[in-house]
Image (cartoon, rainbow, N blue to C red):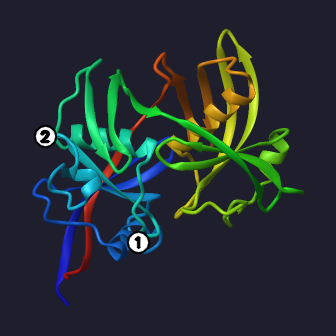
């Protein structure tokens, strides 16, 4: 059997991990089966998702190709082989990948635009951290959310941050720790295109800065150590419930800490680390 070698890098943002591949020529589109194989934690490289770096105009996807020439497109796929709009942690890791591959430059304080299926996102470098402008957000209606470990279904708030989310507030950290998120929470009414579900425990608000703890079940993946757009959704929901008492939020997730800010335009920013941890070649049967 002839084998095909795919060069890749592995990166993460607060434990939300991704397999990344570069496709400057736009001639190596990702296929669902290939994505599932790469993301498999036992038989593949392992990751919450797979990201292809491809110039806009060469992605073969109208949502990604409808961006200015010279923009790098983030072709993002969930671990189950389904294409996704975007990923807040993934955007930052994607930019770190571009920098380490020599595909882009970004001085401290500088910015770079990234094409995603949820539109073009701007990323700004702050020293070792990267901040992504997720743009305007939308708060929606409520759904009942049932999950293993919860005694009764709880109300959840719909929040759109480029990806669909449902955020549920819990009474204390004991309830948060008792959750079993191996199985997807059920939503009533059902979300048409699925949704990520965040469970949060609000903390204190002091000097205009709020804090929360969060766990998340991501559609197409399962429970992850972190979800960037989910951290933003959780902060925005808590901000709403608090009467907009703060515009800066510290979000602690199992994989680390993220910061969410709402600027004067009503845009949500996500700031956090992004690291490339190793590189290699993955072997698969040639098509």
Q: Quadrant of residue 249?
A: top right
Residue carrying label 2: 70
Q: Between 15 and 69, which is closer to the camera in this rendering?
A: 69
Q: Are marks 1 and 2 in contact (CB under 8 Å)?
A: no
Horizontally, residue 204 falls left or right of residue 18, namely right
| Crowd tier of the residue under label 2, counting other residues whose Cα lies within 10 Å: few below 14, some 14–19, many 20 or above | few
Residue carrying label 1: 36
Q: Residue at x 50, y 23 (%)?
A: 266
Q: Between 231 and 224, which is closer to the camera in this rendering?
A: 231
The spot of residue 187 in percent (x, y) is 71, 60
Q: How many marks?
A: 2
| Residue at disc 1, secondary structure | helix
Number of the label disc, if any, that sits on residue 97: none
Q: Quadrant of residue 96?
A: top left
Residue occupying the far top of the picture: 207
287 vs 99: above or below? below
111 vs 4: above or below? above
Residue occupying the far right of the picture: 151
246 vs 222: above or below? above
Dividing the image into 4 quarters, which one contains the C terminus? bottom left
The answer to which of marks 1 and 2 sits earlier in the sequence is: 1
Q: Residue at x 29, y 17 (%)?
A: 109
The spot of residue 57 in percent (x, y) is 15, 52
How far is disc 1 from disc 2 in space, using C-alphas? 29 Å
């Amino acid at each position: 059997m002839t084998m095909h070698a795919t060069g890749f890098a592995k990166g993460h943002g607060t434990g939300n991990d991704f397999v990344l591949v570069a496709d400057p020529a736009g001639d190596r589109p990702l296929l669902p089966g290939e994505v599932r194989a790469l993301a498999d934690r036992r038989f593949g490289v392992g990751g919450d998702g797979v990201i292809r770096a491809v110039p806009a105009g060469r992605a073969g996807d109208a949502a990604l190709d409808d961006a200015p020439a010279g923009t790098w497109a983030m072709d993002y796929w969930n671990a189950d082989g389904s294409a996704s709009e975007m990923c807040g942690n993934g955007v930052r890791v994607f930019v770190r990948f571009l920098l380490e591959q020599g595909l882009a430059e970004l001085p401290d304080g500088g910015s770079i635009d990234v094409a995603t299926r949820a539109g073009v996102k701007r990323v700004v470098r702050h020293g070792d951290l990267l901040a992504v402008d997720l743009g305007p957000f939308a708060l929606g209606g409520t759904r009942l959310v049932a999950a293993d470990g919860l005694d009764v279904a709880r109300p959840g708030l719909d929040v759109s941050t480029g990806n669909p989310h449902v955020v549920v507030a819990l009474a204390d950290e004991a309830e948060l720790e008792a959750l079993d998120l191996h199985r997807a929470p059920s939503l009533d009414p059902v979300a048409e295109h699925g949704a990520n579900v965040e469970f949060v425990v609000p903390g204190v608000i002091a000097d205009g800065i709020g804090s929360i703890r969060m766990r998340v079940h991501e559609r197409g993946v399962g429970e992850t150590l972190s979800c960037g757009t989910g951290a933003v959704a959780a902060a925005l929901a808590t901000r709403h419930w608090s009467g907009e008492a703060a515009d800066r939020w510290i979000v602690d997730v199992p994989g680390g800490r993220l910061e969410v800010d709402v600027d004067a335009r009503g845009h949500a920013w996500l700031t956090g680390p992004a690291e490339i941890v190793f590189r290699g070649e993955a072997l698969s049967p040639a098509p």
